[in-house]
Amino acid sequence: MDGDSVLFSLRLSFQVALGATTLVVLVGTPLAYLLAMRQFRGKDLLDILLTLPLVLPPTVTGYYLIVLFGRKGAIGALVYQVTGFSIMFTWYAAVLASFVVALPLMIKASRAAIEAVDKNLINASYTLSHGALETAVRVILPLARRGIIAGAVLSFARALGEFGATLMVAGNIPGRTDTMPIAIYSKVSSGDWSTAHLMVIIFTVLSGLVLYTSNKLGKRIF
Amino acid sequence: MGLAVELRKKVNGFALDVAWEIGNELVVLFGFSGAGKSLTLQLIAGLLTPDDGRVQLGEEVYFDSRQGVNVPPQRRSFGYLFQDLALFPHMRTLENIMYGATGIAKGERLDRARGILKAFHLEGLERKFPAEISGGEKQRVAFARALIRSPAVLLLDEPFSSLDNPLRLEMRRFLIEVRKEFGIPVVLVTHDLVEACTLADRMIVYSRGKIAQVGAVAHVLNCPVDGEVELLVNRRNLDLPPHLCVQGPTGRLG
């Protein structure tokens, strides 16, 4: 049994999930707004691209991330040349993987909520001399908050449990990138059943707590 | 300030083709449901774009298909009342009204809102959400929100249709007061003949996307231009005020 490594993995998992959820909310909400409210060329394609990580095997998503962000990847090579830094096999890569995999959940939930906002309320805002941005911030997003929060919670849960894509881009480096799901996998592989056992129980209880808190929070806000 | 509109729009097989002009008066757009009355208001306010035509308020051109002018709705000076009132459910009474206080100096907004709350008998409801106030109060909040920034014209899309009768009468009186107080042109969409008769200075009768007749209420009632208008303004079962039952001149307007 190795208490320190359990604690480390636990902290890392929450750190990664929080980071990914923050990104998901910041990026996903405007994208959901765009998809719900605007007509533009390539909208269907964008929708499909953003949804793909939901249906692709995580290894495929991970593969694409390597192709894009690896040291020789399209974006990664550029970043490496300029900064000498590569995201691969760091905990940032775990955030990136969780972000990409959780993003579709955020977009689905908040897009549906934004589309459900009464069109008359949006029109009323316009006739009261408020432009599109102000209408979005003061009318549409507050009225869609239920779906947006639901999307964020789903994304957090998904990010917390992310395994496949994370393994491909962040690897399994003990004490650096081994989040709970990855640590559990490697404990089981190496036959350390007692540690795996403890981690599974902690993970299950904490996930349950996350759901409980989100339910409580949901009731208080609405 | 006058409002002149010329609107053509095809929507799902329905074709609207109307042109009319009003001065500082209360004009009722009257007709059966689906005649294009609400669509007209939406086109005037810029919530929908006409296929072609023109919308002009005083000297200001809001829409002109030939010149390629199309001012977005948030920069048109209309107060708009929606059929369902469209009060923001997540805002309290005061917030709803303040949300309409655009184009007013920040320091004056609250004073102006307090003033209109008082004038519309809404004091004490400042912190209530729309779901917590009565139907009549909601109506007055919607009026307050639409009027606080002093729009040039008031567009009303059947705002009283969902009210029970006593409240509807109260709101009609209220509208007459509002018009006295603000002195701006009002376009009221309704398919309620009594409402049209008690409120309108002039009536524009719509029929299947076109104008069937324009004129003073008494005139339209007494000299319907064709069978369809006659059917629309059939008074047999109505208890109209006596001044409307006088036989008017027989000429045809408009």
Image (cartoon, helix red, strand yellow):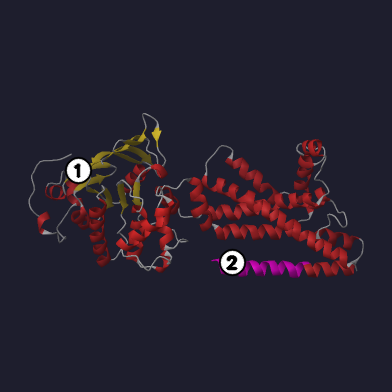
All told, the count of numbered labels is 2
**B127 above or below A168?**
below
Dots 2 and 1: beta carbons under 8 Å?
Answer: no
Residue type of the residue flagged with mark 1 = Gln
Residue placed under numbered mark 2 in the picture: A218
Would residue B100 be visible to someone looking at this image?
no
Residue annotated with mark 1:
B213
Q: Position of residue A212 (x, y in %)?
A: 66, 70
Helix, strand or loop at mark 1: strand
Which residue is depicted at the point 15% across and 61% down?
Answer: B239
Q: Nearer the viewer, mark 2 or mark 1?
A: 2
Quadrant of the snapshot with the C terminus of chain A:
bottom right
The quarter of the rendered structure image containing the N terminus of chain A is: bottom right
User: How far is mark 2 from mark 1, CA to CA?
Assistant: 55 Å
Location of residue B38 in the rendering, given as x and y in whole percent from the top left corner: 33, 48
Of A198 and A135, the residue lying toward us: A135
State the residue in front, A204 or B212.
Answer: A204
Quarter assignment of residue B128 = bottom left
Q: What is the number of the mark on residue A201?
A: none
Q: Of helix, strand and loop, which mostly describes the magenta segment?
A: helix
Residue B246 in the magenta stretch? The answer is no
The kind of residue tagged 2 is Gly
Q: Chain of mark 2?
A: A
Residue at 38%, 35% (x, y): give it. B51
Q: Subunit of mark 1?
A: B
**For the magenta stretch, what is the residue range?**
A203-222
Residue at x 23%, y 60% (from the top left corner)? B173
Instruction: Say whether residue B219 is visible.
Output: yes
Q: How many residues crowd around disc 2 within 10 Å: few (fewer than 14), some, or many (20 or more)?
A: few
The reply, left or right, for residue B193 in relation to residue A207 is left
